[in-house]
Image: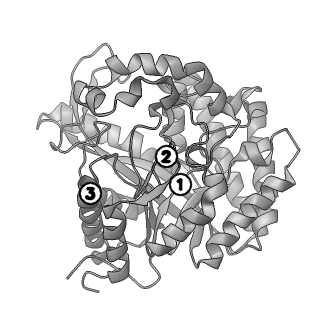
Amino acid sequence: MGNKFPKGFLWGAATSAYQVEGNNVNSWSEWEKNNAKKLSQEAKNKWQKWQQEKFPEMFEEENYLSGQACDFYNRYEEDFDLAKMGGHNAHRLSFEWSRIEPEEGRFDENEIEHYRKVIRSLKEKNIEPMITLWWWTNPLWIENIGGWENKKTKQCFLAYIERIIKEFKGEGVRLWIPGNEPGTYIGMAYVKGEHPPMVKSIWRANKAFKNILTAFDEAYDIIHAHQPGAQVGLSHYARFMSPKTNKIFDIYITRLLDYIKNWRFLETCKKYDFIGIQYYRANSVEIKFSKSNIWGPIKEADDITQWHSDMGWCVYPEGIYHLLKKTAKFGKDIYISENGIAAIDDAKREKFLKESIFYIQKALKEGIKIKGYFHWSLLDNFEWDKGFWPRFGLIEVDYKTLERKPRPSFYAYKKIIEQNGLDE
């Protein structure tokens, strides 16, 4: 095989509905209206001086209001044309539940037809879709009954899943993911309390997480019942973790944290055909007492390397190789469903991309079943509670004019795709 990827390998990028579509009405849109001012005021204490100087927009309330975002809802044809120009043969995207079912039991036929057009646009361009059906945002009527803490939400979600699969089973969609990074969602929304509904309760977190996991297992059955040939997978955020020192307690606690954060989820879920690994960040781990740490004496730091993203995350491309080796033990096909870097300096993105591909190639050579790579992201987009200032896109977006401009990394990725791997 040399340095070449296998025939049929999926090369693409990813987007999520709320982060790019614009003008959504759901749990997050209501939350950001109530918290944008607070987020802009907290930026001075949250971010380091170099970040504040580099991205002064973080102090503007408007930065935290998604508004029209990238207007992907109306410009998806243009964006898919760019993806095609970049050599992509696959694209990961999501459907927005709140658009499709704005009220309980009332499905909006116009929105269903919109997403049908989106899928057909991809298929016409010979770009294979990977569809995620829930990406952290809930319809307001779901949020009003308690969100994922309420068992009824699971039944409502499954009704939504069934309607979608009935509508789209004939559209040639092979790859389905019930929901994006449920562990991250629970951690941010129910443990740290930084995302809606801003809860800080391990008990409530476990309650919501259990409902999500059982919903995903049952969604698997529903999708396969209507589309037996479908592949239904999980998207899972994983960090590379390394002990800060050679002390026995640091080594032990790193292994424990690695299991809890990275692998317990995959062991708990019972039904999935593939695993989507989402990797951005590496952390050192040590025992160090800190009042501000939710893990008590366990401290995680972004200091494995001196290379950091604009968000301050430790960048360690080799980490994906180690995570892929561990993921392979589950015996499922693997997709890298997200992998990227927040970098206004595009040279860093190109470096990150090439080094990541190198380590993915290394894993492939060792026999690990990797089926595709989706870079995060195709476009600059709305990065949740960070707003618009972090830049993840292969394509730059001017948020005032909505002009798209492919970055040099876009063309570097295109070359990798054309060669089906890095240079020999």
Residue labelled with disc 1 = 15
Looking at the rendered image, the quarter that the C terminus falls into is bottom left
Looking at the rendered image, the quarter that the N terminus falls into is bottom left
Q: Which quadrant of the view contains residue 255? A: top left
Residue lying at the far left of the rendered structure: 246
Q: Nearer the viewer, residue 129 or 335?
A: 129
Q: Nearer the viewer, residue 350 or 289?
A: 350
- Secondary structure at numbered mark 2: loop
The disc label shown at residue 352, or none? 3
Q: Which quadrant of the view contains residue 46? A: top left
- Residue plotted at (40% across, 17% down): 42
The disc label shown at residue 381, or none? 2
Q: CA distance from mark 3 to mark 1?
A: 19 Å
- Secondary structure at numbered mark 3: helix
Q: Nearer the viewer, mark 2 or mark 3?
A: 2
Seen in the image, is 105 located left or right of residue 421? right
- Residue plotted at (61% across, 42% down): 68
